[in-house]
Amino acid sequence: MERLAHLNPPQRLAATTLAGPLLVLAGAGTGKTRVITYRMAELIRSGIAPNRILSVTFTNKAAREMKERTSELLGKKTRAKPMVSTFHSFCVKVLRREIEALGYPKKFAIYDRGDQESAARRALREIKVSDKQMKPGDLINRISRWKMGGVSPTFASDNVENDSDFLAAVAYRKYQNFLRSSGAVDFDDLLLLTIDLFDQFPDVLSRVQGAFDHLQIDEYQDTNGVQFRLVQQLVEPHNNLCVVGDDDQSIYGWRGADVSHILNFHQHFEGTKVVRLEDNYRCTDRILEIANRLVRNNPGRHDKKLIPHKMSGPGVRYFKYQDETVEAESIVREIAYLIKELDAQPRDFAVLFRTNEQPRPLESEFRRQLVPYIVVGGQSFFDRRETRDLMAYLKVLANPSDEVSMRRIINTPARGIGTTTSQKLLERAVRDGQTFWTGMKNRPADLKLPTRAATSVDAFVNLIQRYRNAVQQDPEALGETIESLVDAIRYDDEIDRQYSEDDQRVARRASVRELIDSVYDYTRRADEPSLTEYLQESALTDQVDESDKDDQLAGNSVKLMTLHASKGLEFPRVYLVGMEEGLLPHRRSIEGTSAQIAEERRLAYVGITRAQDYLTLSRAMARRKFGKTRPAQPSRFLREMFEAPPNINDTDDSSATPQPVEEISVASESLSIAESGDLQ
DNA sequence: AAGGAGGGTTTTTTT
DNA sequence: AACCCTCCTT
């Protein structure tokens, strides 16, 4: 047992319970990751081959981290690596081999959010619903909810309550047909098609089941219905399932995650053992106190209390500022001061926020005050336009029936194929029952196009075919091919045409370069490179070069991220900004159900429990939105954290006195560390 | 077909 | 404020 000396008794129990269903209820900062890696090591020591253990994580980042930590723990000697994967990439691996059984092309494309929107827009247009009546984004969310609930396009219209639902159901059918004929799947389809595959082809299922003996799932509170079904299918022969999670950190309800999976785990899997981890080693007592006070306002949770092990930490601070600019300026100034005078490292700091519009003022302050920072995860990678353009080219080379991508590139950069020509070609193709691409390739003689347009179309078809061949014939040289393509379409000239400022041009070229480099990178690392595989990987790993992102996350800079993106991380010093009604809780949740408010509360809880030593909350009294400044009210969560609950006299536990709080006003010029408030 | 002006709209969170 | 769409001119 000495090898588990670093674990406390419950952790040890969790790490050594190897067979049968195991539920580990692990609160924030209780050493969950450590337990998972130790358990993996124990499994291997008990004689299980590493590659017969499948661990599922929620994000790619978590997967990479788990791989690293396990191989550290196991040492170099083991050759076979444990299988660590996200639900989505696991499904892609299965589908890459088997999807043809379901009538999809082997080189299926994965549509990301942007592609989905284009597809949704097209579906809505087809049934003559304007963007105003129903936004493509809303349609996608609704479709996703249907998919996660297992409702197929055929049956979506059965249980509709209103006209808008009915229209959405019709659009859902169009959307799905469109994806199918484009040979494309969306993120939800990846999961759905996999369980379909398993249901329809038991031999495939048993082959996959036979590939491993143990399944571990991290962040189990975030599983949705389809993922749950997949888990059931996978563990059915042996029930060696270990799930780890915390119902208080369930923050993905909006995309179908269902807390009841973790709450009712023992009912779903017979003979479940439960281990609770409640010893928190991350946060100080002060931080944990307000976290506990906040989250106990939520109904229907596993009532647990985190026990602090870091006593007498500094108080949690709360500031209110005039507006978001002052908020940003003061926070950055404090960070700069702490780095310069008190030996703090930029990497010690994280600034957390609710929405992706919030980092803007912060970013410009960080730049102005020369503090190194990085926005983690946000789609805000400078412009994605170039990346998206070039990715669309790659997608077309891999799968020319991908209509969304084809439409994006057909006249980008402008090559004389305008909307009229595209429209004619597309309509004709639809009439002939062909895809956009085949219709273009075998352009019917009776389709009258102006000579100029016809020449351009032919030249374009030619270009695509030439590069398609190149990609197929020499997959090893993918990088060179793409570089040559970018050259051939004169994309640099396009950038010059579109942007007149030098910085802009440099930045845009850099992102083109980044993409090309990531292709080179991929060919170097892949055993058997193929464009399809590159595309499928990058759809799941967020397009941006991952290794680069890793460096940035590890690098010595202040991290800026959304609360969602912060899950699973920890920092010595955390600033949680924008504690305002409408932002946290978000307006859309306030207008919604109390369950949505509860999720916002958990979101705040997640943010607070990221902090190891210092936590600073703040809000602005007025905030700019859509170019207009509007007053903002303090978040209800502040009250819940800092004021006494209404009926407090039912207990003699007067030591748990609520922390008295007054707002500390900070005028734009007056903040210095010495006088900044330390709220008891 | 291309490019520019003007007007309307937008932002929750992400694999 | 930034983006997208539409309409207008060339």
Image (tube, coloured by chain):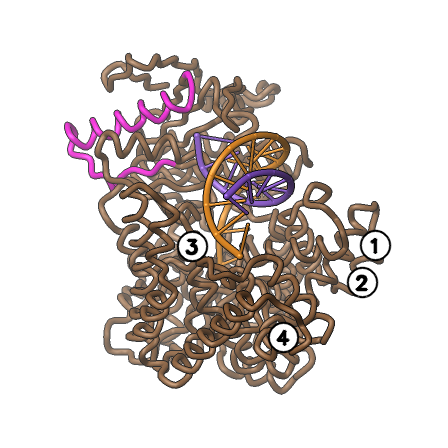
Chain colours: A brown, B orange, C purple
Looking at the picture, does residue A426 appear above or below residue A675? below
Mark 3 on the same chain as mark 1: yes
Q: Which stretch is magenta?
A: A322-351
Residue named by callout 4: A439
Pick the residue in front: A182 or A469. Answer: A469
Residue named by callout 2: A155
Question: What is the chief secondary structure element of the magenta stretch?
Answer: helix
Pick the residue in front: A149 or A154. Answer: A154
Q: Residues within 10 Å of mark 3 (few under 14, many from 20)?
A: some
First in sequence: mark 3 vs mark 2: 3
| Side of A431 relative to A407 (left or right) | right
Looking at the picture, does residue A233 appear above or below residue A144? below
Q: Which mark is residue A159?
A: 1
Are the residues tagged 1 and 4 within 8 Å (C-beta)?
A: no
CA gap, disc 3 to disc 2? Answer: 47 Å
Mark 2 on the same chain as mark 4: yes
Are the residues tagged 1 and 2 within 8 Å (C-beta)?
A: yes
